[in-house]
Image (cartoon, rainbow, N blue to C red):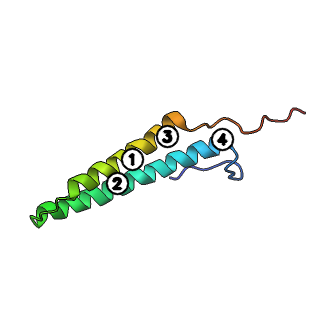
Amino acid sequence: MPPRWPRKPDRKDPAFRKLDDRMTFATHVAAFTAINSGLWFFHNFKYATWEWLPWFTAIHLVVLLSHLIYISAIADYSSETPPKST
């Protein structure tokens, strides 16, 4: 069941940005897994000589790890403007 957001989605909301970035990362992991497992399956199945495949996988893995580092350590999810007191 997909996550539900209790209010109108807004990229200015820090909690929504954090959830959206994590969901985007999950999509990135799924794409990495699907693409690379498919390529390696056909590489082994057809006994292909794809010299570029290990490089492709390594570069894609570096991009994936960079994405993880960004959302876990670099991204600032603090409020852009302080809430107004009433």
Residue assigned mark 4: 14
Asked whether, in this view, residue 30 is left or right of residue 77, the answer is: left
Instruction: Tell whether label 1 touches label 3 (CB within 8 Å).
Output: no
Looking at the image, tell me whether mark 4 or mark 1 is earlier in sequence order: 4
Residue assigned mark 2: 32
Looking at the image, tell me whether mark 3 or mark 1 is earlier in sequence order: 1
Mark 2 is on which residue type? Phe
Mark 1 is on which residue type? Leu
Instruction: Tell whether label 4 touches label 3 (CB within 8 Å).
Output: no
Percent position of residue 41, x then y = 18, 60
Spatial distance from mark 3 to mark 1, Cα to Cα? 10 Å
Residue at point 80%, 35% (across, down) = 83
Mark 3 is on which residue type? Tyr
User: Splitting the image into 4 quarters, where does residue 45 fall?
Assistant: bottom left
Residue assigned mark 3: 70
Residue assigned mark 1: 64
Looking at the image, tell me whether mark 2 or mark 1 is earlier in sequence order: 2
